[in-house]
Amino acid sequence: MLIFDHVTKRFGANVAIDDASLTIRPGVITAVIGPNGAGKSTLVNMAAGSFRATSGRILLDGVELQGLPKYKIARAGLSRTYQNIRLFDGLSVLQNLEVALVPRSLPTLIAQAFWLGPGAGAEVRDTCMAVLQRLGIAHLAERQAGSLAYGQQKIVELARAVAARPRAILLDEPAAGLNHGETDELKAHIQTLRGPELAIVLIEHDMRLIMSVSDDIYVMNRGAVLAHGNPEAIRDNPQVQEAYLGQPGAMGNIEAAARGRRNRVRLRAGEGLAWGQS
Ligand SMILES: Nc1ncnc2c1ncn2[C@@H]1O[C@H](COP(=O)(O)OP(=O)(O)OP(=O)(O)O)[C@@H](O)[C@H]1O
Ligand SMILES: [Mg+2]
């Protein structure tokens, strides 16, 4: 269980997260939605150790994550994907996954060097290959990550997050920049992640995806939790509609907004690829 307990985050005078409390249960898919700037990525960044909260606690299975270095947070079982893809472009797909496993398997690597022979390294490799297989991209294992199409890179990011066998996985706009077919594929993958031990957080603007896969939805607005409930309750909530579009009764237009955004993100992603990292 991942808990944000009365968390506040200030950047100077800007209150990015304002006393937000969220409970992310294992076994279900919890969506976090909200307009641009609502604070969704900031929640992920705090949980994963990129930012420290100004106040409040973030607990994963009872362990306080605040103040732990990123690798210890990863070791505690939290894994995330980025809104803007962050793969090692020059490494192969398989190596991108292996690198993600290094913190956890460091003792294994040392043991391998001194006592166990090459078998232990093969174990990491097998784990990574199994994940690639599960996500239908085993055939891309030896390809350079930077040479892949944008949609494929998003799946590699997901694979990397899954490979670490997390207890909580936070997906920051995994569908951004994907077309309808790719989004459907992603949706199937997210559904297969569902398991009794894993808490899944899905941050998205694509309401079609959100409404079809989520069990539980938190709506953020201006850093605060505006609403929390199941998809039906959220869809019918006039406050939610107002937060998105400034007027009640306009929820259907969110889809159009998401489509426009998707096109913009794809454009940005193209630039990102040309430069390497985005
Ligand atoms: N590193 C930072 N320094 C200063 N302000 C920041 C930083 N990161 C985020 N913010 C601010 O915090 C607020 C929340 O931003 P955040 O990126 O979490 O929103 P979001 O909900 O993820 O939006 P989007 O849908 O556009 O991704 C915004 O006002 C943003 O400008
Ligand atoms: Mg964001």
Image: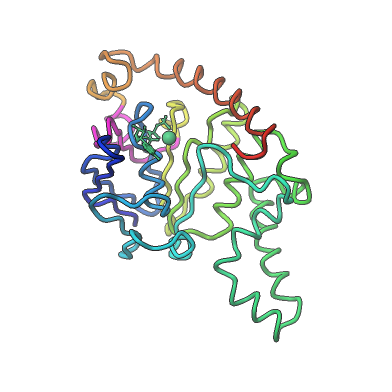
Residue sitting at x 68%, y 70%: 123
Tag count in the figure? Answer: 0
Residue 268 in percent (x, y) is at 58, 26
Question: Which residues, given as a range, are shown in magenta?
Answer: 213-234
The image shows residue 123, relative to residue 235, as above or below, that is below
Q: Quadrant of the C terminus?
A: top right
**Ligand 2 in which quarter:** top left
Side (left or right) of 155 relative to 238: right
Q: Residue furthest bottom?
A: 115
Residue 151 in view here: yes
Residue 221 in percent (x, y) is at 28, 30
* In magenta stretch: residue 216: yes
Residue 228 in view here: no
Residue sitting at x 32%, y 16%: 245
Residue 168 in percent (x, y) is at 43, 54
* In magenta stretch: residue 144: no
Residue 204 in percent (x, y) is at 44, 33
Residue sitting at x 69%, y 32%: 274
Residue sitting at x 60%, y 35%: 185
Which one is nearer the viewer's eye here, 142 or 267? 267
